[in-house]
Amino acid sequence: MSMKYSNVIIDHCSIKSSYVLDNCCTGAKMNSCGLLTAKKEPVPLKSIEVELEVRDHVATLVSTLLYENKEDKPLEAVFVFPLPGDAAVCHFSAKIGQTQIVAEVKEKQKAHEEYDDALSSGQQAFLLEESDQSPDIFSLSVGSLPPGESASIRLEYVTELAVQADDGLRFCLPAVLNPRYQPKGSEGGSVQVTSVPASLVPYSLSFSARVFSPRPISKVESNCSLDPLQYLNTEQTQATVKLAAGHKFDRDVELLIYYKDAHQPTAVVEAGQASAKPGTLMGDPVVMLSLYPEFPQAVMSSVVSCGEFVFLIDRSGSMDCCMDNSNQQETRIGSARDTLLLLLKSLPMGCYFNIYSFGSSYQHIFPKSVEYNEKTMEEALKKVEEMDADLGGTEILEPLKHIYSQPCIPSQPRQLFVFTDGEVENTKEVINLVRDNSGSHRCFSFGIGEGASSALINGLAKEGGGHAQFITGTDRMQPKVMQSLRFALQPAVVDISVTWDLPKAVSVTVLSPPITAIFQGQRSLIYVQLTGQSPETAEGCVTVKYSLTGHPSQNQLRFSLKPAMDTGLTVHRLGARTLIRSLEMDIENEVEQDEGVKQKVVELSVQSGVSSSFTAFIAVNKDDSEAIQGPLLRRNVPAPRMMFASYCAMSCASSDICFADGGCEAEGYSLDECCDEGDEGDENYIAMLKQPRRDPLLQLVSLQKASGCWLLEPALAAALGKTSEEVENPKPSAVNKEVWATILALIWLHGFKSDVQDEWELLAMKAASWLCAQKAPCVTECVEAGNALLGCKVQKDSLGI
């Protein structure tokens, strides 16, 4: 089979290493031979080496980038790349030959002027800065690299590890940087991203990790191939792991680290910097507290039966990408449709809901949220089945504004679910809008696929008092989304306060913003600065108080004030980053920028050595060597991207080749527009990819009624793998058809789909509640007959009836 893109015919089984691919939307060509950009310019970046150190739930990453100029003229190399949105960049240096140059943090405009002056005078200079549009995109400029010269760039950052639904700690090294969509009419310069398909990235990546924990390390998993985990001690509290040889830049590198007894509240006290002035953030001790509030069991045994659930679905062109290269039929939009089916079936009767979708424009199924019942659920499901990735770009701001313009429904707390691959440029503006409306709702966000903006996804959840999830690689979207629905069905925690009990000589300054959301068993992080002297044997105590369903509750943690060993300044830098982010958000919410607050951010950034939106790292080689002569050539280092992967990850020799260009989505193109319409083979392939999967679980779930019951119908028999007669004959005569059908469906779920119970548990609870309300006779007899029919051994008690 062959596919035709522009004027290039590609035979899937006979592609050679010298292939040249047409960019289907821009006409640019990419050559895989040698270090060449899309413009056939040499790439001076040779390799990236990443070393990760994880201590409990904090990660320190050191990245070494090796540059080499093989041209006959001096170069300026510019590399735009992603970092975790909450990372605190704390070190930047360059080594040329035996000369080591450590960068300083300076106000951004001054850093730019110093960089430009250095280049104009023939000096080598290095500049690292955060994008104005999004805190998860950085630009690295390597200036005046002479012919034949090499430079080694060292970049270090620290970041917190998010806790996943299965208690794993998630670290993500964003390798993929997809083009960010700039809304029509928006002002300001966009980030100029030079990118190529991941398989064409002309530099190598090596990655290794060391994990240290006070508790045993159960396992480490990844979306990439890893060498076996190596334990460093018999207690299994220290281990190393690294990427297997031959890793490709075809995905972000995700690690999931599992500890035994992970949900333990902890406090890390870090001594201040000896050279810093007491009373300053860097001079005083800083404490990082990890709290895991536990709700009373009586509250957790039931879920709320009210609420307004608003689902916002990304339908931009990039949602047609596949979820994973190994499953070419599972696209992002297809998975979103399946997930919406589960969500709609799991909602409680009597709640309210609506579904929005967006691209370059937005749509909604109902003019306003409607009450959830059989009629509205079926109407919504019909619309969901028709959803495709056909709305062009990624303009999320306008649908959010429309959602917030709708008045809240009394006694129906609003819960917003946002599904997107996160390729938006106006990240800060979107997050600010959610923050401005945080008092009226909770926001649960889902980043879909490689390259989703961590700043956007985490920012939406943090400012919206909800929870963030990332779905990459072979992850299934459904269990993660259903976990968030369980959070949304938990009663809202209100009147949250934090109080401190410390020695009289010690005062506390809280660096973190106030806690606005608490979920059962989910971590809350607090950073505080301690000023004053206290004995090392002294203790402190923090108490979190809140109200839950009208009842006051509290959780408490006592901790030693003795500084921990071997923490470096990690906690200080994370605390500084937290405070900087909070101050930056305050500035962005002001109509006129407060120069005093901006100056405070700059001073804090310079003092702590942590990056901010108003500062940059600048390093200049001021040795006495001769000035670099000749015109300076600019070389943009391409970052890997993963766009339209569902059509690019073919079999045979082309399995690691991306054919379509990421610019398509930003302009609203579909794959059909990139391909030759006359190529019948292409149309058949596209049609094959878009065929719905026949998932037995989803087939059964789709038949459930809004009330929770199933009907005894031929479609149910088919979903159970039986004929209508086989299903109807064993029914006890005293039992009505709906009760019998619902018991059969529950037995099938428990008997054959127990491995994905987290996906259907809520809708099964609704079915069990419906059954209990029927007060039907012969339930035990029905369960026994159902087990015999389906070949299961499910106990009645496990069904919840």
Image (tube, rainbow, N blue to C red):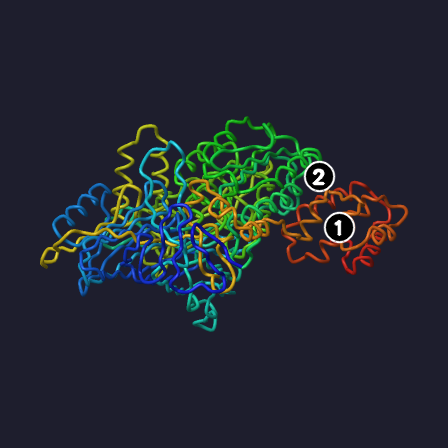
Indicate the secondary structure of the residue bearing disc 2.
loop
Location of residue 36 with respect to 365 vertically, above or below: below
Q: Residue at x 44, y 35 (%)?
A: 435
Residue type, label 2: Ala
Q: Which of the 4 quarters of the picture holds residue 210? A: bottom left
Residue 130 numbered tag:
none
Residue type, label 1: Ala
Is residue 468 among the parts visible in the rendering?
no
Image coordinates for residue 286, horizontal then vertical, percent: 35, 50
Residue 745 numbered tag:
1
Image coordinates for residue 528, horizontal then vertical, percent: 37, 46
Residue 706 numbered tag:
2
Mark 1 Cα within 10 Å, few/some/many (few <14, many 20+)? many
Mark with earlier residue (2, 1) = 2
Closer to us: 425 or 563: 425
Residue 373 appears left or right of 556: right
Outermost front residue: 678
